[in-house]
Amino acid sequence: MSAHHHIQPMPDDDADLARWDDDGAPPAQPRSSPNAWLRVGAELGDRLVALSGRQDLLVTCRPGTRSGAPAAFFPTLGEVEFDARLFAPLQPHEIHPRIVGDEERYPAAWGVFVHEAAHAAHSVWTAPAGADPRVVEAALLLEESRVEGAHLITRPTDRTYLRTSARTLVMPDIAHPTLQGIDQAASAAALVLGRRDVGILDAGETQAVADLCEKVLGADLLATLTRIWTAAHQCADHDATTMLAHAQQWCDALDTAAPDLPVPENLTDLLSGAVGVVMDSTAATDAADLAAQAAATNALANRSRAQANDRAQKASRRRQAAATASSVFNSGGATVNPDGTPAPYSNPVTGTRRPTAAEKSAAARLSRALRAAAYRERTEERTTSPTPPGRLNMGRALARDAQRAAGSVPTAEPFTQTRRRNSSTPPLRVGIAVDVSGSMRAACAPVASAAWIVARAAALTDPDSRTATIAYDTHLTALTRPTHRAPERVTTFGANGSSHNLANALDALDHGLELSRPGTGRLLVIVTDAVYTPDETAQAVTRVKQLTTAGCAVLQLTLTAKSRHLPGTTLLHLPQPSSAPAAIATAATDAIRRTR
């Protein structure tokens, strides 16, 4: 059977495996053979197209290579040879290079593959026949860092993998050198410091090799070699002549300096130790970067989860507020629990009465004040044009004639037109939440009067204006509702409740009056002494903050010196409860005046 065919399991083998599927033994592992790597090689070939920009290359992947190197690129054959042992401990059935991102599970192997892809893309020059083998070998040494630098220009995100490949490729070359003496130290400098100068490795990471090479080669020779590989990095991919010229300079520099440079007897050990320090440093840097990236990813995921939870909580709260508003304002005057169920034995409403002449007069005055505050001057927009209509500006007309006489393109626009537009009058939204616990009896009469006055004035001011009043203790009761019709009678109520439920009252007012939506004059008045439990206060403060952030003015009216300030509200202490209607009217007028 041809080696290019996959070995498929025989039907008898499948039957045997199925027969013993439930024998309690560990699951059977897929068989691995050299032929099983053919699929991996084919998928690497698919990814090589994106890495190198070439579609004429074949990737062979098998345990061991013909060249003995971890990987190799053969330009004349159009082939990249890859050692499957680089994927250890993964088996071929666990490796799927065609899937983008799968390479993160085997960064060392992928780094070597990226290095060979860099060769395939940029090592396209060929040495002429008869070239000195030593010079060609030196050119190939300079080529190692040159192709990686060229690859980074088009694929900078591959730097992490090229750093990993350096640990895989450089150490074997140092531990088992093919060169001796000064040539060996120069080779280590080209492999490590050359990668430093193209941005693969950092200067601090390579300091150990730089210090050792300077000690062995001398500062002058190392500087000369650095200039040579730096110049080689600028060489074009097809320029064999220039590349071989740099390699000849390399060989000449070493030949000139070699007689005067003593070679340490343990040079291989010294270089292996220095390169080991470099590779340990790069591994530590990469691990720190990976940990930082993981931490940033986790922080982003946690923030996303928190935002999702916050959105879910806000959506749930909006649904609950809608349900609460519907139950409160559609209950026909009955008292309800926050969940919408009736609470008939807790209704604070004591009856209704006809408004007094003073209340009617106050409503009329407030209506006039609101209309005056809502008035907006007409806006003017001035535009210029080179042609009528519009008022002629003689100065600009003369300037235009002068431009035309001078032979230039006329830019002056002598006609001015003014457009005046009426500004829309903003409607009003006023919500009143009155505490009807036992300590608030003094507020009942003035707040009942204020609720009627504000509702009446809003209806007389603008048909789109809305007001609503909710009395709250543990339960909620609508005293006025958000309709365009003014109430005919004043709803009176008492304060005999216990505990508090301001948060749900604010939710109902916010949803019923759209206090969180811009475009209207919005005011929320809370009449309370704010003597709440910590949990009640926290829930109320959360709603108040949401409303103030949305641009709604929040006013707290208190009547006694023992009252507490609800954080986030504008506190107004009223020693005389009868002044509450005037205070609310003033605040409503300010709210409509501030609307833009």
Image (tube, grey):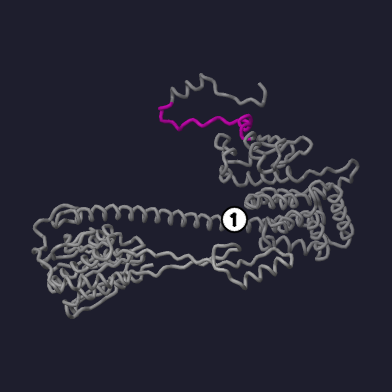
Q: Is residue 249 left or right of residue 278?
A: right
Residue extending furthest top?
A: 12
Residue at the spot x=61%, y=41% of the render? Answer: 87
**Is residue 22 magenta-colored?**
yes
Q: Is residue 455 visible?
A: yes
**Where is 526 relative to 198, above or below?**
below
Query: Looking at the picture, which amino acid does disc 1 mark?
Result: Asp
**Where is 455 relative to 113, above or below?**
below
Q: Is residue 46 left or right of residue 457?
A: right
Q: Main secondary structure of the magenta part?
A: loop
Task: For label 1, count other residues whose C-alpha is less than 10 Å away and answer few (under 14), some (14-19) or many (20+).
Answer: some
**Residue 584 image position (x, y, % from top left):** 24, 72
Q: Under tag 1, what secondary structure?
A: helix
Q: Quadrant of the C terminus?
A: bottom left
Circle 1 is placed at which residue position? 286
Q: Which residue is more in the foreground, 419 or 61?
A: 419
Q: Is residue 535 visible?
A: no
Q: Which residue is more in the foreground, 320 or 499?
A: 320
**Is residue 207 magenta-colored?**
no
Dividing the picture into quadrants, the one containing residue 435 is: bottom left
Q: Give the residues drawn in magenta, as a range.
A: 21-40
Q: Is residue 513 left or right of residue 334?
A: right
**Residue 201 image position (x, y, % from top left):** 67, 57
Q: Which residue is more in the foreground, 46 or 262?
A: 46
